[in-house]
Amino acid sequence: MSTPLSSQSKATPLEHGADIGFRESHLPSAEQARALAMQAALSSHLETQQPREYSPLEKIVRLGEAVVAMRRVESTDNEAIQFDEQQLRDMPEVLARD
Amino acid sequence: MSLITGDVVAVPTSLQMPKNRPFKKRTERELLQMESKIGAELFGPIAPGRRREFFCLDEKTWIWHEDGTNKETGEKEQVTTRYEITDKGVLKVLPGARYSYIQADELDNLVKATQIYYERVAREVYGRDPRTGRKLA
């Protein structure tokens, strides 16, 4: 393989790139690259689909935040605030009993 | 509770949860009192002459309070416990500057109490589905 470094007259540590194991043949083929990308995407998807486990501490904090959010929205002290249901998107996991 | 919301001997009828909604707008203080009424029920029956409060003060503070008259001595007694959520754990703060991080069963019980509190308060005070936040029909 011709690299910019291989045209240098004197050997440099970088010129020995081949000696540290790099070979063009080590690059994944297009098919392998696609398979790897798909695998990574699938892993990422499964990760986001799996319910997250909350620690006791995290649960108490999330529940407190949710209570305070509802209280603020419903009180006459804060007429302008709208309740954001997205704030409770993780509640099924938070409420999961051990 | 009295330190937070004033001396509440009995919840005024105007603050009791109506059986037939629609939900009426109230101040944060009034809502806190309604929440606390539910919180007090989470730990079993309250002995006659005693009063209990349990409520979420803010995102990281839960308060448990009980007062009444000691049957044996006739003296009035009260205990207020703050559960403060810190990065290291749940710090239990008792009168007399006594601090300790709760663990094991006590921590489990607090988690369960806060879960039930949230579920009941969401439904009974705010008329919302606790899992989605959507208004209940």
Image (cartoon, rainbow, N blue to C red):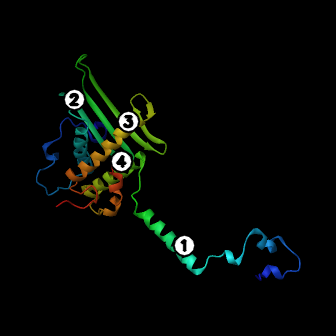
Which chain is indicated by disc 4?
B
For mark 4, does the 10 Å Cα neighbourhood hold few (<14), some (14 to 19), or many (20 or more) residues? some
A11 relative to B71 in the view: left or right? right
Residue A36's disc number: 1
Question: Does the image show residue A84?
Answer: no
Gap between marks 1 and 2 measured at Cα = 66 Å
Is B57 above or below relative to B99?
A: below
For mark 1, does the 10 Å Cα neighbourhood hold few (<14), some (14 to 19), or many (20 or more) residues? few
When asked about the image quadrant of residue B93, the answer is top left
Residue A33 at x, y = what percent?
57, 76
B71 relative to B98 in the view: left or right? left
Q: Amino acid at mark 4?
A: Asp
Residue at 41% from the left image edge and 56% from the top image edge: A52
For this orientation, the residue located farthest to the right is A10
Tell which circle, 4 or 3, labels the residue nearer the N-terminal end. Answer: 4
Q: For the image shown, how many numbered marks are present on the structure?
A: 4
Residue B50's disc number: 2
Q: Secondary structure at mark 3?
A: helix
Q: Secondary structure at mark 4?
A: strand
In the rendered structure, are the residues bearing label 1 and label 2 in contact, judged by CB atoms less than 8 Å apart? no
Q: Secondary structure at mark 2?
A: loop
Q: Which residue is mark 4?
A: B58
Residue at 43% from the left image edge and 29% from the top image edge: B98
Question: Does the image show residue A54?
Answer: yes
Which chain is indicated by disc 1?
A
Q: Which residue is mark 3?
A: B105
